[in-house]
Amino acid sequence: MTRPDDPAIPASAQERPAEIRPRTTARRTPGGASRRGPADPVKTLLHHHRDLCERAVDPLEIAAGLEAHGLTDRTAARYRHRDVFALAEELYARVPPRTRAPAAGPTTGSVPVPGPDADARAAWTLLALLPGAACLATAVVLRVTEGVLGDGTRALVTVVGAVLACLALRACLARGPLRAPEGAGRAGMYGCWLLSYAVYGEELLAQVMTGGPDGPWDGTPAPLLGLAAAVAPAAWCVHLFTVHAQRRLAGSRALEEFGAGVRPLLLASVTLFLGALLPLLLLADLGLGGSGTPLAAACLGVLFFVARLLAAHGLPEPGTAALAAACAVEAGAPALVLAARLPGLEPLARPVNALVSTGGTGAVSALACGGAAVGLLLHAAFALSRASAHTRS
């Protein structure tokens, strides 16, 4: 055996105890197994949605984007957060602030909320009143000049009034609460059909069922006047729904909580609009010499309102589909009656005959527009309860 002071042994070997093993370079987890997968799941999520997080001006915009990609509060638990809102706040905090654009306009909490801009509200309110004013002026001119002007001149006055009303409606839909940021698709074409049927459809169907059509038929312009006058209440109802929904989004801490709070707002907005629409339709019907209950026109007004509400929140496709379905039903009724005149096809007219005998010729339009409005409202209750629908308006 050698002595500790033997010069043949290095000094480092003399100082280190024999029982201490050399340190290994491999790192182990507390459980003894090697670490697998990403240590920070939020970092992986940030990598996948980095563009969304860099463009967002507040955490709720990130929450809405995550929800649009399918993340729920239950999914957020896998990222060690109680809900999507808390997860969005961490993602927002991790993104460098120099990559974000500053939020424009006044805010409440972290959600941009429409400010008290009285001039802007007055501007789009005035535009919303123009379609009804154009239709009312045309109706007054036709009533005053009845028996004075010839048929050609009266037709020219009607055409001029219709063009002015269309231009006013186009200007109203281009700005304010009724503006559709992604366009309305083919909804305008279907809307023109439905309005034309509201004016001339009942008389056409009556003539077809009695062996016609026999020639020109008289129109009922009262629904058109009432619906045009209801554009202003529709704009205000959409505005109130949007403002209160964004405030609800600012105060919510879970997606389920936000959805449960928005559905009553939607129902209240539709009810408020219907409460304003019915008196206008009744006044228009009485002013133009009518005596019927404008049920079909009310159903058409609600259908237009819900379709435009969805389009104003970036969802025009469901409204377009509902309008197209209503057009198909209205066009199918006289088509079935005409087809039933062929030998062997008489049963085709039985549904239309039963419907008209029960509720009159207006029952076809009421069924078509009412059914489409109910289906679209059910879809809106689901679509507008998502936070992502309120970041586009």
Image (tube, rainbow, N blue to C red):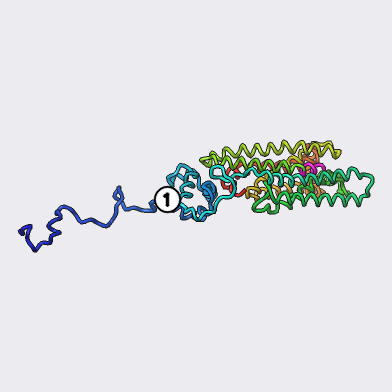
* Residue 99 placement (x, y as % from top left): 50, 56
Please tell me how crowded label 1 is: few (under 14), some (14-19), or many (20+) other residues with Cα within 10 Å: few
Give coordinates of residue 133: x percent, y percent: 80, 44
The one of 381 and 85 positioned closer to us in this rendering: 85
Say which element carries label 1. helix
Compared across the picture, whether 112 is left or right of 189 comes to left
- Taking the image as shown, residue 232 lies to the left or right of residue 11, namely right
Position of 141 compared to 108: left or right? right
Q: Residue furthest bottom?
A: 8
Left or right for 274, reference 263: right
Q: Is residue 277 above or below residue 48?
A: above
Can I make out residue 186 in this image? yes
Residue drawn at (82%, 38%) of the image: 285
Quarter of the image where the N terminus is located: bottom left
Residue extending farthest to the right is 148
Q: Characterize the magenta stretch by its predominant secondary structure.
A: helix
Q: Is residue 261 above or below residue 194?
A: above
- Number of numbered discs visible in the structure rendering: 1
Of 68 and 321, the residue lying toward us: 68
Quick one: 165 or 92, which is closer to the camera?
Answer: 92
Residue 351 visible in the snapshot: no
Circle 1 is placed at which residue position? 41
Residue nearer the viewer, 19 or 233 = 233
Asked if the stretch drawn in magenta spans residue 48, the answer is: no
Q: Which residues are magenta?
A: 221-228
| Residue 170 percent across, percent down from the top left | 74, 51
Q: Amino acid at mark 1?
A: Pro
Image coordinates of residue 217 in percent, x first then y, are 87, 47
**Does the magenta segment cover residue 223?**
yes
